[in-house]
Amino acid sequence: MLSSLGRCALRAFEGLSISATTSSAFQLQQRTFTRSAALLKSIRDEQRAGTKVSPAQQDAFDGTAGSELTVPVNLKGAESRLPTAETYKELFNGIPFSDLPMVYIKATKNNTLVQAVDPKTRSVIMYTSCRLEGFKNARKKTNIAGQTTGVAAGQRLVRRGIRTVRVQVKGIGPGRMTAVKGLTVAGVQVVAITDYTPLKELGPRPRKIRRI
């Protein structure tokens, strides 16, 4: 037999436990379940894996990519396209071939340099590069930078009254052919393209032998 004080304490404890149970149940009903998003791969992992490109999507240009692609070329009548002794006497827009200004394009790995020279006086008519056109750091070694440099060089030649030139390309950088395209976009007629890229007789120096 409990006393009246013990009975009151027991009733108070039971009411407290019931209220605590109902409040916890109410809290559980209000609680929402969330799930975190799927863990995505980092940029570094994507860069290491590389981009898978099918052979049909590969583009062979600039002499740096697409070497594994075979493109059929018709060599019939190729001799007629090569210059001869009479080519130097031929007139292009009223100017002999030998007197046409020469545009030197040096396509390095990190930059593209364009320089126009007068063949008679050997004086520099115009000079520009990707850096002078506003491209900095890694942006200099892009196709767009080479084309922009070619367009800027062509516009400078047009302002000086030069619309017919010969082009001499040196190097295998990314701006190799885009610079020539930029010249033509600016309104300059390219009569001849000569490749003066130096090639070593035995190729590049091989890597040293790994010693374990």
Image (cartoon, rainbow, N blue to C red):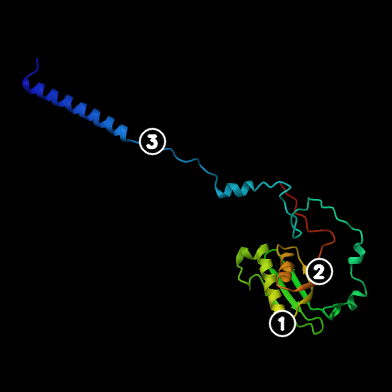
Counting from the top left corner in percent of width and height, residue 151 is at: 68, 71
* CA gap, disc 2 and disc 3: 69 Å
Question: What label does residue 193 carry, if any?
Answer: 2
Of all residues, the one furthest to the top in this rendering is 1
Would you say 47 lies left or right of 114 here?
A: left
Residue type, mark 2 in image: Ile
Residue type, mark 1 in image: Arg
Q: Secondary structure at mark 3?
A: loop
Q: Which residue is depicted at the point 88% across and 56% down?
A: 74
Q: Earlier in the sequence, mark 1 or mark 2?
A: 1
Would you say 116 lies left or right of 138 here?
A: right
Q: Which residue is depicted at the point 61% across and 65% down?
A: 137
Q: Earlier in the sequence, mark 3 or mark 1?
A: 3
Question: What label does residue 33 carry, if any?
Answer: 3
- Say if mark 1 contacts mark 2, CB within 8 Å: no
Which one is in front in this view, the residue at disc 3 or the one at disc 1?
1
Residue type, mark 3 in image: Phe
Counting from the top left corner in percent of width and height, residue 108 is at: 71, 66
Q: Which residue is depicted at the point 82% across and 62% down?
A: 200
Q: Secondary structure at mark 1?
A: loop
The residue lying toward the viewer, choosing from 8 and 81, is: 81
Question: Count the marks: how many?
Answer: 3
Would you say 46 lies left or right of 167 here?
A: left
Q: Secondary structure at mark 2?
A: strand
The residue lying toward the viewer, choosing from 184 and 102, is: 184
Which one is in front in this view, the residue at disc 1 or the one at disc 2?
1
Q: Earlier in the sequence, mark 2 or mark 3?
A: 3
* CA gap, disc 3 and disc 1: 73 Å
- Residue linked to disc 1: 160
Q: Is residue 137 above or below residue 101?
A: above
* CA gap, disc 1 and disc 2: 21 Å
